[in-house]
Image: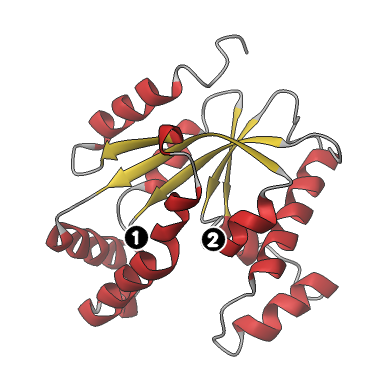
Amino acid sequence: MADKKYRVLLLFGYPGCGKGTQGNVLAGMPNLYHLAMGDIFRGLDKESDIGMEFMSYATKGQLVPDELTVRVWRQHVEERIAARDINPNYHILMLDGIPRTPSQVEHLSSFIDVLKIIHLKMDDRNRLVQRLKGRAAKSNRPDDAKEEVILNRIKVYENETLPVLECYDPQLIANINADQPPLAVLHDICKALVTVVPAKI
């Protein structure tokens, strides 16, 4: 893939807007492959060079540098290609959690061709907070149920990740109302993707 970019879809939205739910459902489509950056980080071999480099930041509560994040992502994709889980000529990669900063956009620009950006929008902040509290209770993560922690996560998203959308052509962005039942959200996403995802599989 040195001379060819990966075809990708980007999943964007506030914490709790349903990116994971929709990404997992869409991953059931034969030619879509869902890649969540959080899962990739958690799956690193902590004894490998890149895993130890990641842990040197994670164990100190520091943000993982953009260059390292992109390097981890690229290595993971290359490993999945080598294992024949991903066929770049067949699969479109759905990226969730990357790029998260304008700097990551720049680092990735040589490797990805963005076909569409699915932006799950929720304007009701109270609904977001309630969703996250409910998810935390189901996942047995009491810290995530604290409202001050949730509000901080929302603030970080607004300050660091939302500006990523400004790095792309507005015509690539499909704004989806995420404050609907999940099936209605899925319906709207599918309508946005039908023109960019190949009909033949």
Is residue 136 left or right of 75 when viewed as pictured? Answer: left
Asked whether 175 or 94 is in front, the reply is 175
Asked whether 59 or 1 is in front, the reply is 1
Q: Amino acid at mark 2?
A: Pro
Disc 2: which residue:
102
Disc 1: which residue:
15
Is residue 79 left or right of 167 when viewed as pictured? Answer: right
The single residue placed furthest to the bottom in the displayed view is 60
Place of residue 37 in the rendered image (x, y in percent of width and height, measured from the top left): 58, 57
Can residue 81 be seen here?
yes
Q: Secondary structure at mark 1?
A: loop
Identify the mark at residue 139; answer none if there is no mark: none
Mark sitting earlier along the chain (1/2)? 1
Is residue 89 left or right of 163 when viewed as pictured? Answer: right
Residue at coordinates 38% horizontally, 25% vertically from top-left? 192
Residue at coordinates 28% horizontally, 34% vertically from top-left? 185
Can residue 140 be seen here?
no
Q: Is residue 95 above or below residue 14?
A: above
Place of residue 183 in the rendered image (x, y in percent of width and height, measured from the top left): 27, 30
Q: Rounded to the nearest whole Å, what is the CA distance between mark 1 and mark 2? A: 18 Å
Q: How packed is label 1: few (under 14 Cα within 10 Å), some, or many (20 or more)?
A: some
Res. 49 image quadrant: bottom right
Mark 1, mark 2: which one is toward the viewer? Answer: 2
Q: How packed is label 2: few (under 14 Cα within 10 Å), some, or many (20 or more)?
A: some
Asked whether 112 or 77 is in front, the reply is 112
Residue at coordinates 30% horizontally, 51% vertically from top-left? 17
Q: Amino acid at mark 1?
A: Pro
Place of residue 141 in the rendered image (x, y in percent of width and height, measured from the top left): 35, 73
Pick the quarter of the image with the N terminus.
top right
Q: Secondary structure at mark 2?
A: helix
Res. 5 image quadrant: top right
Res. 91 image quadrant: top right
